[in-house]
Amino acid sequence: MEKDRSSQAPPPHVLVFPFPLQGHINSMIKLAELLALASFKLTFLNSHYNHERLVKFNNIAAHFERYQGFEFKTITDGLSLDHPRSGNWFLDMYKEAMELKMKPGLREMLENISPLVDCIIADGFLGFALDVAKELEIPIIYFRTSSPCSFWVYYSIPDIIQAGELPIKGSEDMNRLLTTVPGIETYLRCRDLPSFCRETDIEDSIIKLYVKQTRKSPQADALILNTAEELDGPILSQISTKCPRVYAIGPLHAQLNTRLKAKHGESYDHFSNTLWEVDKSCIFWVDKQPNRSVIYVSFGSITSTSREQLMEGEDVVVELMEKSKDQGYIANWAPQEAVLNHPAIGGFFTHNVWNSTLESIVAGVPMICWPYFADQQLNSRVVSEVWKIGLDMKDVCDRKIVEKMVNDVMVDQKEEFVQSAAEMAK
């Protein structure tokens, strides 16, 4: 006789809580949906500000109504409504809001939510979530949305300092190899450290912030990383010496695409989870281009380009739009997964945030790497030196070098890069 469903225990209730930035929300909402597909009850906790933007630019309700018990809840990020939330705004949030406003808000929600939460999956950069979980005796799993290599470097910064390898002594020191970080001592240079490590003051507040948040990770019940053993096996082995319960469950976007297609006969790129309005019309332009003839350029949601880097200044965008209507297309925000998987795309000029790097790897698209900050510096080194599926252009602001690298990826070394990228994508 079939067991009475009403007598079965309710599904575990999981709270997923991302750091309030586009890239963090992107990967963690994918994880939440994967858990919903496995019949967990899900609560996705977002900031008021970001949830309003998600609802404004995406059909959230229609997409997630298929999952019984999937709920969205919000919490303040502690900043005023008129705060620009651009550039490194999240540092203001750390200074002004987390302990005073977000932490008590999280505690109050967890104490009053029904049914009670069985497990929290919190962004590993939200250290206060771990404190609250321990106070309320709720199991908590950390999810670090950056690359495993960068996590390991953040964790190792005190060891690098203790060994006398930091601070960096000047521009002449940038290519010096660092030998203190196990597993990457053969290719990690000063130049590849996170941008905040270039400070001459090793007591810098940003360095302390990254180290503090990362070194709390072993206190969580487990650590999730958005990668696969095939990509980061050696680094995962190193991380497991500090965090014994490490789960590599990525690339998440590919995992979710596979499961959605199997269950619903659809591809995940039918649904967007961005904080900006997506310009899907760019695909019509890409459709008209020959195979592997287009280079896709995107530097993410918070990258700030200096006037020197842009060179021509503000007028360059207008000029490009007028003079290259047939040769290019400028979109405010593109459907990146769909673009990268289009046969016309031959290269990706990227800042190498981890989500973009994974999406490019899965799509088999070679990269030109121009990192901006945080994990991007190290990601670009791994792409070029370890995986050999792109070129690293960090610390360069020269149009001739840009031109050469584009030609290398798209023309001169095209077949070599295409083959390497295709092998990585398997």
Image (tube, rainbow, N blue to C red):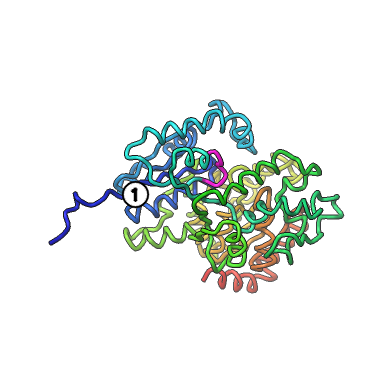
From which residue to which does the magenta span run?
A: 123-128
Q: Which kind of residue does numbered mark 1 sit on?
A: Pro
Q: Residues within 10 Å of mark 1 (few under 14, many from 20)?
A: some
Q: Which residue is mark 1?
A: 12
Quadrant where the N terminus is found in the figure? bottom left
Query: x, y percentage for residue 144?
Result: 55, 51
Query: x, y percentage for residue 56?
Result: 43, 36
- Which residue occupies the foreground of this view, 246 or 206? 246
Query: x, y percentage for residue 338?
Result: 48, 56
| Residue located 61% across and 29% down the image | 96
Q: Is residue 218 above or below residue 405?
A: above
**Is 139 positioned to the left or the right of 158 in the image?**
left
| Residue located 47% across and 43% down the image | 17
| Residue located 43% across and 43% down the image | 138
Is 125 colored magenta in this rendering? yes
Q: Is residue 326 above or below residue 385?
A: above
Is 382 colored magenta in this rendering? no
Query: x, y percentage for residue 159?
Result: 73, 54
| Mark 1 secondary-structure assignment | loop
Q: Is residue 115 above or below residue 352?
A: above
